[in-house]
Image: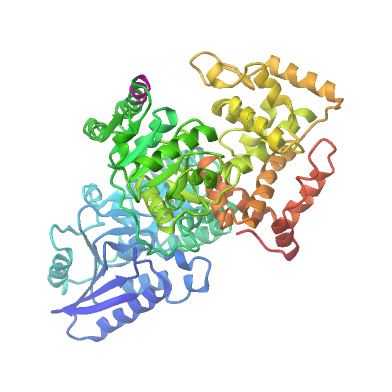
């Protein structure tokens, strides 16, 4: 690991070697610097080619070093780029694959750049709350022009090399090489070996016909589109300095100051936490990364309803054949029609080409008999959420499915161990809890039963990547990670109604905090009858657990949500606008009067923190019990499945940012409220311990 070195005639080739994407970690930087000095000291070498091993040039910083002393230890990236800038022998970057972040900045420090076609090029730092920190905002405008460069920097999105090569007047690539890139790069290096003076990107001029108006427009647009993120407008400021700074060094200092200031913002910390958390979610402590995977070439889905159809689309999108099973032909017909409607909507919007749509539909088959799915490698049931129904399905699957097939349940709350016990192969049973709409939502809760085999778990986690889901492993408990926590959140929302809030007030406060949707709008969207069914089960299983009766009274009025045109809010036919309901307010007021509760004015701050800290405390219990293996897994569930604001990093990250001592003190105040549930607000043992020790969840 580091950087390889060889000499081809008069050209030295330095190959970045730090799999999987040749991150510019400490060892790689040290080896690169040593090899560059070696090339300088070899009289035979007239030029240097820098390339990447494997399928990447460099993906930038090595995320495995984030937060460690190695990340900034010399030689740092700025030092390497200065070495390239100062080199008396020409350096050619041979961009063979992924070229992002610090990798692109390193290439911009070279004198020349040649690239293979199809290479993704990006400066994605904005996605973790930063501006590029090694000259990206100063050099990219010099080679691509202000507008193209700024668009890439503000969005962080990759652009293919051949597309950038078509930008009028671009100086990013000196040549796009078809065929063997390294051969082409070495020939090019030999051709330009004696060309002097050496051209440096830093010496190029940045121009724009109307800079003041353009940058003001760009800044206003960035602020409007990313109002909760400070990095995008700072990207505009930095690119502006590439043109307006007195000299290149002043522009570099401005960029570096912006980078360091953003690094300390809570938004940046939250985005970095989410970035690392998403990658960490796929790592399971006792399942080695080299665990052999089962082959999944054919998938079966039982149920062609909204959930079954959405689940099927995920696999069709990934090019995996799917067979949908239903008991009646009309149910299959409705399911296929819904899938077609979804795809046709994407075609109309230009998000999907017609030929792709037809290819995906060609992968879909249907059956009315279990014998039609017997050869599937993975079967996912998406039937009614009732244990008796699940039992019948899994006993049939146990009889029908081939040995080694993975049997998955889409259950959102039921006991996966009990479901596995209905089969003679519990090692093959796993929970795959998709979130509705399943073809849109990123989250997949993978529920690990007591007997789920490690290769089953590893296979499902790998499959999740193929279908572009963020998969998080949960142990078995009622509601798993997400729904177990949201139940406490919903309980608090109900208590707030009893104490003086309206549904609209609670939703407004939480949405102002950053949630995509408040608890009452969320209930109306999901269907209030679903929560009602869960509460009825709770009243039998946990008679001591207290709920506000307002939600039950709402359902007794037949107000199940958007699907009935009335829930916590009123809805007009064909519209999703939530209109405050006088009937609901009257019901709440009558219920308060029956309880003898004197209403009080409740602040937005109390609303938000009762709801969010209820998630935090239940999350701490989940960690303590080993249902989740790490706090970042809980945050990923809430960022990708429940609309928690990304710039706050998830509930556990947010609690850390507030200080766990302060969280516990606030919870003690909530426990003193006679209308709340004092026992719930006793800090989970893990939370109490971390707060006492001055530590954090993450």
Q: In the rendered view, does 407 fall on the left or right side of 582?
A: left
Residue 52 x/y as whole percent:
27, 67
Residue stretch in magenta: 330-335
Residue 566 x/y as whole percent:
60, 17
- Residue 123 found in image quarter: bottom left
Q: Nearer the viewer, residue 393 or 257?
A: 393
Q: Residue at x 75, y 16 (%)?
A: 586
- Residue 21 found in image quarter: bottom left
Q: Residue at x 53, y 33 (%)?
A: 388
Residue 612 x/y as whole percent:
67, 43
The tally of labels here is: 0
- Residue 368 found in image quarter: top left
**Colour mode of the rendering:** rainbow
Residue 624 x/y as whole percent:
65, 57
Q: Is residue 88 shown to the viewer in this render?
A: no
Q: Is residue 120 above or below residue 320?
A: below
Q: Nearer the viewer, residue 501 or 319?
A: 319
Q: Nearer the viewer, residue 564 or 40?
A: 564
Q: Residue at x 37, y 48 (%)?
A: 157
Indicate the quadrant containing the N terminus: top left, top right, bottom left or bottom right. Answer: bottom left
Q: Is residue 273 shown to the viewer in this render?
A: yes
**Residue 536 lies in the magenta-colored region:** no
**Residue 334 lies in the magenta-colored region:** yes
Q: Residue at x 60, y 47 (%)?
A: 477
Q: Is residue 527 above or below residue 9?
A: above
Q: Nearer the viewer, residue 467 or 662?
A: 467
Most common SS among magenta residues:
helix
Indicate the quadrant containing the C terminus: top left, top right, bottom left or bottom right. Answer: bottom right
């Amino acid at each position: 690991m580091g950087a390889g070195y060889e000499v081809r005639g008069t050209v030295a080739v330095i190959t970045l070697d730090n799999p999987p994407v040749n991150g510019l970690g400490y060892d790689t930087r040290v080896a690169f610097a040593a090899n560059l000095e070696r090339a300088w000291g070899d009289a035979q070498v007239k030029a240097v080619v820098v390339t990447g091993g494997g399928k990447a040039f460099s993906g930038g910083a090595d995320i495995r070093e984030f937060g460690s002393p190695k990340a900034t230890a010399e030689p740092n990236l700025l030092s390497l780029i200065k070495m390239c800038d100062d080199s008396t022998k020409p350096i050619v970057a041979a961009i063979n694959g992924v070229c992002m972040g610090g990798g692109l900045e390193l290439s911009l420090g070279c004198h020349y750049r040649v690239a293979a076609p199809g290479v993704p090029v990006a400066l994605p730092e904005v996605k973790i709350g930063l501006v590029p920190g090694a000259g990206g905002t100063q050099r990219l405008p010099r080679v691509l022009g202000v507008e193209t460069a700024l668009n890439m920097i503000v969005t962080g999105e990759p652009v293919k090399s051949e597309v950038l090569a078509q930008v009028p007047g671009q100086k990013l690539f000196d040549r796009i090489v078809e065929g063997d890139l390294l051969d082409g790069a070495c020939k090019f290096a030999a051709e330009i070996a004696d060309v002097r003076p050496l051209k440096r990107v830093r010496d190029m001029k940045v121009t724009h016909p109307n800079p003041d108006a353009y940058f003001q427009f760009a800044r206003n647009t960035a602020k409007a589109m990313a109002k909760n993120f400070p990095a995008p407008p700072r990207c505009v400021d930095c690119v502006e300095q590439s043109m307006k700074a007195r000299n290149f060094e002043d522009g570099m200092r401005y960029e570096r100051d912006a980078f360091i200031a953003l690094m300390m913002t809570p938004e940046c910390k939250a985005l970095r936490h989410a970035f690392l958390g998403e990658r960490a979610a796929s790592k399971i402590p006792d399942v080695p990364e080299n665990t052999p995977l089962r082959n999944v070439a054919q998938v079966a889905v039982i149920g062609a309803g909204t959930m079954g159809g959405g689940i099927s689309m995920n696999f069709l999108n990934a090019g995996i054949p799917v067979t949908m099973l239903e008991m009646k032909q009309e149910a299959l017909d409705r399911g296929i029609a819904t899938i077609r409607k979804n795809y046709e909507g994407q075609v109309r919007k230009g998000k999907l080409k017609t030929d792709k749509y037809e290819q995906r539909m060609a992968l879909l088959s249907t059956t009315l008999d279990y014998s039609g799915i017997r050869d599937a490698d993975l079967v996912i049931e998406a039937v009614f959420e009732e244990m008796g129904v699940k039992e019948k399905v899994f006993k049939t699957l146990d009889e029908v499915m081939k040995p080694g097939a993975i049997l998955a349940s889409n259950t959102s709350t039921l006991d996966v161990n009990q479901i596995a016990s209905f089969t003679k192969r519990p090692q093959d049973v796993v929970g795959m809890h998709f979130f509705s709409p399943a073809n849109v939502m990123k989250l997949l809760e993978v529920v690990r039963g007591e007997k789920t085999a490690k290769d089953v778990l590893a296979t499902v986690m790998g499959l999740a990547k193929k279908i572009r889901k963020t998969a998080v492993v949960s142990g078995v408990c009622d509601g798993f990670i997400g729904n177990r926590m949201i139940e406490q959140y919903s309980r608090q929302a109900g208590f707030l109604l009893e104490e003086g809030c309206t549904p609209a007030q609670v939703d407004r406060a939480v949405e102002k905090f950053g949630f995509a949707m408040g608890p009452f709008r969320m209930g109306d969207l999901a269907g209030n009858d679903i929560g009602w069914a869960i509460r009825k089960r709770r009243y039998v299983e946990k008679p001591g657990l207290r709920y506000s009766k307002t939600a039950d009274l709402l359902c007794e009025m037949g107000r199940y949500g958007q699907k009935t045109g009335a829930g916590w809010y009123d809805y007009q036919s064909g519209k999703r606008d939530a209109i405050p309901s006088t009937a609901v307010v009257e019901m709440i007021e009558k219920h308060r009067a029956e309880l003898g509760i004197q209403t009080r004015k409740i602040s937005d701050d109390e609303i938000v923190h009762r709801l969010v800290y209820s998630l935090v405390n239940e999350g701490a219990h989940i960690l303590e019990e080993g249902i989740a293996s790490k706090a970042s897994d809980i945050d990923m569930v809430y960022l990708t499945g429940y609309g928690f604001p990304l710039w706050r990093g998830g509930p556990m990250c947010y609690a850390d940012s507030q200080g766990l001592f302060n969280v516990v003190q606030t919870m003690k105040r909530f426990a003193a409220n006679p209308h709340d549930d004092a026992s719930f607000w006793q800090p989970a043992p893990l939370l109490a311990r971390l707060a006492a020790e001055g530590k954090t969840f993450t």
